[in-house]
Image (cartoon, rainbow, N blue to C red):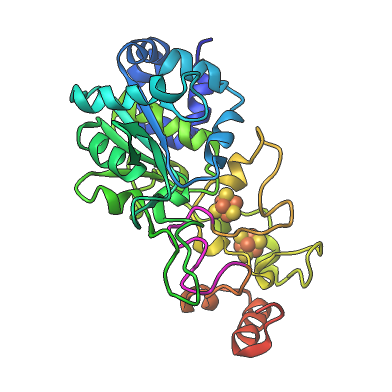
Amino acid sequence: MSLSRREFLKIMGGTSAALAFPGVVLQGCKKALERVSERTNVIWIQAQSCSGCSVSLLNKVAPDVAGVITEHISLNFHQTLMSGTGHVAVSVLEDAVKKNRKDFVLVVEGSIPTRDDLYCTIGEIDGRHVSAREWIEKLGQNAIAVVAVGTCATGGGIPGAEVRATGDNPTGAKSLASILPDRQIINIGGCPPHPDWIVGTLLHVLLKGVPKLDEQNRPVMYYGKTVHEQCEHLNEYKEGIFAKHWGDEGCLYNLGCLGMDSGCDIPTRKWNDGMNTCTACGAGCIGCTENVFPDYGKRGIFKHLTASAQEIKSLHPETREVVLKLRNGGAING
Ligand code: SF4
Ligand code: SF4
């Protein structure tokens, strides 16, 4: 399986990412990838996760994930994809720590529980359960690059969501950045992230180093624009055509769409190899790529947006009237 120039550009994000790549890399990307595959290992730790990010990765169509794993990277460890089990599997991590290996990229999926070191352990050493936190702290020291995959890893996500009664979460779930405060973390937000974001970011790290990151340390090539500014419903929004109920035609703002506050390229990249998008299918954007997901500052999802004064000012007069009315207590779903 080889990665064509067209496939490579598609993963990297099309024209804008292509411009960031020197021509020599693009022309020789196949050769470069072959060279990279000889020397770059990936250790992928699943901590407190539902495995949805890995499932999303497995949905990668072109190039298929088997090709990426077997020909472009060497996946040393992944709890659900590797064939080894028990001590054989855990010995990969043990060896990496003991031998002070510095030849791998560390990928972490899921939030990391910190309370009592009890809620997520991976294997045993001398009869002692070893927590995901401990492995990550040890492996994170030497990794070439450290990548958080999915919003549980980038911001705590659903396991890290606040329990209203206690103002905390039961397992003390934290983001990868909280566990490795001295390392630069490349965050690939999303619940789950699009497979192109995962593969494209890893390829960028392997071929050209860390991509340009935004203020949440996410690759700008995927998260640089808001959902709203690329949305299929943008014209309806500007014309003041709003859905009042799920299934209605129109912009989903009044139903709590968070597209204005969320960065990702799904409206153009689309899910399932170009089949559909969160907003086009009528579900709206739940802001899954943002580090504040799903709490959104106690607002939760499917509540009204807090558009900035400038955004409201720039609206079509009729839309502005609707928005101001909603803000003043005329909310349909808030
Ligand atoms: S559906 Fe959401 S993202 Fe799309 S135009 Fe309306 S508010 Fe913006
Ligand atoms: S459109 Fe919204 S819900 Fe869909 S992937 Fe992007 S941030 Fe997540």
Out of 283 and 9, give the one closest to the viewer. Answer: 283
Majority secondary structure of magenta residues:
loop
Which quadrant of the rendered structure holds the C terminus? Answer: bottom right
Q: Is residue 171 above or below residue 301?
A: above
Q: Is residue 324 above or below residue 40?
A: below
Please state if 282 lies on the left or on the right of 223 as rendered. Answer: right
- Magenta region, residue range: 288-301
Tell me where residue 82 appears, x and y as whole percent: 48, 22
Q: Residue furthest front?
A: 127
The residue at 20%/25% (across/down) is: 98
Residue 109 placement: quadrant:
top left
Side of 38 where 322 appears, left or right: right
- Horizontal and vertical percent position of residue 28: 38, 12
- Residue 29: x and y in percent read 40, 16
Question: Residue at coordinates 67% horizontally, 47% vertically from top-left?
Answer: 277
Observer able to see residue 100: yes
**Given the current orientation, which residue lies at the most extreme right position?**
248
Residue, x 65% and y 32% (percent of image)?
A: 273
The residue sitting at 46% across, 57% down in the picture is 290
Q: In the image, 265: left or right of 254?
A: left
